[in-house]
Image (tube, rainbow, N blue to C red):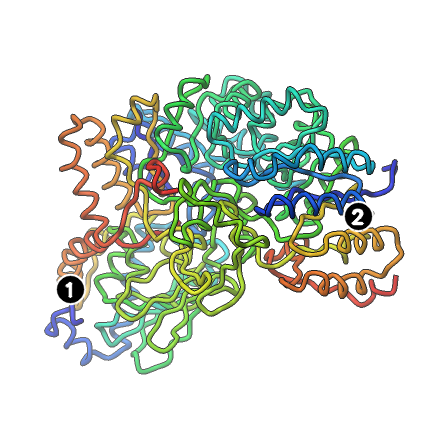
């Protein structure tokens, strides 16, 4: 396979409900300072939240555009209401930027338009990837739970598609029509009063034995542990992965991007980057179990003989 | 909870273990003949040892599907098995006949499963898939203990039917 | 409305047919279906016999191949589809686009149903599957309200099947990696959720603690009925309180809403529970069949028989009722 361009970094959509000004300033700083090529923006988890970022959307897009970032609009990941479907259709018709599909309805609407596929779409094999590509998918970010053996097989069999992996961030594990976040605060989804905004990095779910386990983000459940594939970058590049997705957490994402960029470019050893990453985002332990076909919460340390390179 | 009338269990204490084991093996073989594919569903779990410990009988029954054998031990001995199910005898027999949905039995606190959960689940499904009918399968059983075995089983089964159907509480999902 | 009934074994299959099922759904004994539990499911020979039995009694058979094909091992799923077609399955229940494309192309006359695992939750998504793979029916996610279903029914070009009784997924089906996060095994990849291989019960003082992989899922004080450690139905700590964070250990029962479902355009009612025993299947199918065929005012009495069977077990109408959210 020929490597046509430099491996890229993609900043995923902010999954959490952040204060609007914080959301805007975060993206301004990404535009100005982060070594990422592509930035996903737009509410992905809950349509009720959409109005928060709308006032700042235009200025954020403009800032990212002029910084030379490729802006891709994210869409909703669980579409049930008519207005949610309508919104995706309108975005597809009017947007001058690419859209990312997070749900089957977006796949339907985006047929024959160039688009990207999010890690929330089930791509577990090459025939599925090829089918999506035949309908206009340009980049596919593979699901977090996919083991490396499957990833390698898919990438090998679809040289025409750019594949991306979910390389940093708490892993999106589930989505529900029910809002566990609101329920935990004595509310239901319909009168939630946006209580999920009180936890910009999610609400911890611990086991009865006080083990950190999961994190609530509105209707979405993400992992407690934070995916880190810094140690696997060489293998992933060798397998033909073209870009790495960094999913925003409430930490210095510019620094996170710099660490990934440094390892991709060979300017920093993976072990050093991993140690620094833990300092940049101390809120959660790192995990890479899914990649190694183990439980997603596991951390598989790098073998000694690999560290020398 | 003493579910088996003491009258029926008392003779067991007096009977030498080797005799009980012989009767059980006879029954076990008879069931095996009537249901030749019984343990095929166990797959990789066929090589494991399954212990069934009736809480109301002082005996332990250990089944080895790979060698088509059943062992009977006194409860005083430590049972060595991959998976152990403990329950009143009527529940164990209900499980065997698939006459009730075993989910509830597995997780009501009257019954406990320890050890290899996957193996025991496979066993439960294998038993449910078979159509063991103890009174039918053992009808032609001969020998000095046949009438007693038949009487105990008949008694227990009737009870199992009523109780097990009412105890539907949990589910594998 | 048709009654679609579960069978995990040939014995349960026969019970379901005899009890009056309009169709029975089942799967092969491997990773190609979402109830890949030890000791469960059908060999090729068993499926063939089951289908023949069902046909004789005027009952249909749907074969679930509703996990996602493992990259590089697609042939296992293709072979499953080929064998199900050869056995005479009336429909294949599929979730993976790659497999749907294969079946649509290779067996254009085979009826294709969209599994709940495909997570088609709106008209655009469903029509996409109808147009692309010629799907004839969609099994709707258990995350929709009846109002949602009615609206969807008006604008899709295929039949709708909904779950009415049995286990309840809290999360959007086919989009959940909670199980693999704790155990490495997931419904999508392995056809299992919270697998028995990773379950452990441990005594802690007088409590019974259930664990899944390295994580505690629940703790039962003495005297409280214990449950299987299904991850989303566990008890957890959030901030200063603890409880069932996602869903209580309840099961779904929307038989009280049959008229509303009929009015919404639903053509088939699905009973969950391929992992349940044959006695359960026989009883539930018999009662449900009678309920479907009865006038609405007589259903309550019939269904109370099921509720007494579910003694101590709580049921919910789940997302079908809006307050659940």
- Numbered marks: total: 2
Label 1 SS: helix
Task: Using residue B44 as the reference point, say whether residue A234 is left or right of it.
Answer: right
Where residue B10 appears, as percent x and y from the top left, is 14, 77
Q: Nearer the viewer, residue C300 or C31?
A: C300
**Label drawn at residue C103:** none
Task: Using a 10 Å C-alpha cutoff, classify the residue at mark 2 as few (fewer than 14 neighbours), some (14 to 19) or many (20 or more).
Answer: many
Residue C300 higher or lower than A268, as above or below = above
Residue marked by disc 1: B152
Can you see residue B13? Answer: yes
Instruction: Report the quarter where the N terminus of chain B lies.
Output: bottom left
Task: Using residue A138 as the reference point, say whether residue C113 is left or right of it.
Answer: left
Chain to which mark 2 belongs: A
Chain to which mark 1 belongs: B
Task: Using a 10 Å C-alpha cutoff, classify the residue at mark 1 as few (fewer than 14 neighbours), some (14 to 19) or many (20 or more).
Answer: some
Q: CA distance from mark 2 to mark 1?
A: 78 Å
Which residue is at a point 39% across and 45% down the rendered structure image? A188
Which residue is at a point 51% across and 43% down the rendered structure image? A175
**Label drawn at residue A34:** 2
Label 2 SS: loop
Where residue B48 appears, as percent x and y from the top left, is 46, 64
Which residue is at a point 29% across and 55% down the rendered structure image? B104
Q: Are marks 2 and 1 in contact (CB under 8 Å)?
A: no
């Amino acid at each position: 396979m020929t490597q046509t361009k430099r491996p890229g970094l993609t900043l995923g959509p902010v999954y959490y409900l952040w204060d609007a000004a914080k959301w805007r300033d975060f993206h301004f700083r990404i535009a100005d300072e982060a070594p990422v090529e592509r930035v996903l923006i737009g509410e992905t988890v809950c349509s009720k939240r959409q109005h928060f970022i709308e006032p700042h959307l235009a200025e954020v897009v403009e800032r990212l555009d002029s910084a030379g970032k490729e802006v891709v609009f994210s869409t909703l990941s669980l579409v049930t209401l008519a207005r949610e479907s309508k919104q995706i259709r309108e975005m597809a018709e009017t947007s001058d930027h690419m859209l990312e599909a997070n749900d089957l309805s977006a796949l339907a609407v985006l047929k024959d338009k160039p688009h990207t596929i999010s890690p929330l779409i089930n791509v577990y094999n090459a025939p599925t990837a090829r089918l999506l590509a035949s309908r206009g998918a340009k980049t596919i970010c593979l699901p977090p739970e996919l083991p490396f053996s499957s990833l390698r097989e898919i990438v090998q069999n679809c040289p025409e598609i750019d594949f991306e992996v979910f390389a940093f961030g708490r892993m999106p594990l589930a989505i529900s029509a029910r809002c566990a976040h609101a329920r935990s605060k004595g509310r239901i989804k319909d009168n939630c009063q946006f209580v999920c905004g009180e936890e910009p990095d999610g609400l911890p779910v611990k086991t009865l034995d006080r083990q950190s386990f999961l994190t609530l983000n509105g209707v979405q459940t993400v992992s407690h542990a934070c995916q880190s594939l810094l140690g696997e970058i060489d293998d992933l590049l060798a397998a033909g992965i073209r870009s790495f997705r960094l999913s925003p957490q409430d930490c210095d994402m510019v620094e996170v991007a710099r660490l990934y960029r440094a390892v991709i470019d060979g300017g920093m050893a993976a072990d050093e980057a991993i140690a620094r990453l833990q300092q940049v985002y101390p809120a959660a332990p790192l995990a890479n179990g899914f990649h190694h076909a183990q439980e997603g919460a596991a951390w598989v340390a790098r073998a000694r003989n690999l560290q020398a390179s | 909870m003493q579910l088996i009338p003491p009258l029926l269990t008392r003779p067991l204490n007096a009977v030498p273990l080797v005799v009980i084991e012989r009767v059980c093996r006879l029954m076990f073989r008879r069931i095996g003949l009537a249901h030749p594919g019984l343990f095929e569903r166990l797959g990789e779990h066929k090589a494991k040892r399954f212990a069934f410990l009736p809480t109301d009988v002082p005996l332990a029954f250990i089944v080895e599907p790979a060698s088509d054998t059943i062992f009977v031990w006194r409860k005083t001995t430590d049972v060595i098995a991959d998976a152990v199910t403990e329950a009143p005898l009527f529940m164990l027999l209900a499980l065997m006949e698939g006459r009730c949905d075993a989910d509830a039995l597995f997780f009501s606190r009257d019954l406990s499963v320890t050890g290899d959960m996957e193996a025991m689940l496979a066993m439960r499904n294998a038993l449910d898939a078979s159509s063991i009918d103890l009174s039918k399968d053992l009808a032609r059983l001969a020998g000095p203990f046949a009438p007693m075995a038949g009487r105990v089983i008949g008694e227990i089964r009737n009870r199992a039917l009523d109780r097990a159907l009412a105890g539907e509480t949990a589910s594998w999902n | 409305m048709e009654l679609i009934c579960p069978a995990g074994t040939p014995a349960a299959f026969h019970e379901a047919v005899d009890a009056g099922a309009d169709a029975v759904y089942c799967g092969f004994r491997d990773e190609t279906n979402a109830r890949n539990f030890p000791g469960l499911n059908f060999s090729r020979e068993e499926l063939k016999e089951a289908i023949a039995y069902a046909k004789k009694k005027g009952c249909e058979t749907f074969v679930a191949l509703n996990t996602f094909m493992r990259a590089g091992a697609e042939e296992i799923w293709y072979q499953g589809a080929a064998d199900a077609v050869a056995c005479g399955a009336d429909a294949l229940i599929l979730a993976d686009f790659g497999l749907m494309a294969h079946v649509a192309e290779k067996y254009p006359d085979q009826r294709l149903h969209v599994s709940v695992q495909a997570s088609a939750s709106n008209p655009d998504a469903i029509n996409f599957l109808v147009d692309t793979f010629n799907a004839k029916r969609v099994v709707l996610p258990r995350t929709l309200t009846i109002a949602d279903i009615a609206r969807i029914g008006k604008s899709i070009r295929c039949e709708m099947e909904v779950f009415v009784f049995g286990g309840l997924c809290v999360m959007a089906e086919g989009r959940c990696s909670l199980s693999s996060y704790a155990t490495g095994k997931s419904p999508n990849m392995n056809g299992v959720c919270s697998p028995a291989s990773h379950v452990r019960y441990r005594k802690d003082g007088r409590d019974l603690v259930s664990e899944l992989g390295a994580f505690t899922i629940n703790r039962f004080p003495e005297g409280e009925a214990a449950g299987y450690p299904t991850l989303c139905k566990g008890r957890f700590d959030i901030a200063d309180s603890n409880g069932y964070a996602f869903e209580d250990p309840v099961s779904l029962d929307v038989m009280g809403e049959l008229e509303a479902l009929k009015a919404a355009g639903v053509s088939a009612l699905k009973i969950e529970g391929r992992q349940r025993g044959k006695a359960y299947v026989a009883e539930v199918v018999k009662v449900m069949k009678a309920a479907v065929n009865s006038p609405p005012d007589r259903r309550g009495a019939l269904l109370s028989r099921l509720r007494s069977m579910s003694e101590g077990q709580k049921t919910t109408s789940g997302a079908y009722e809006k307050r659940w959210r």
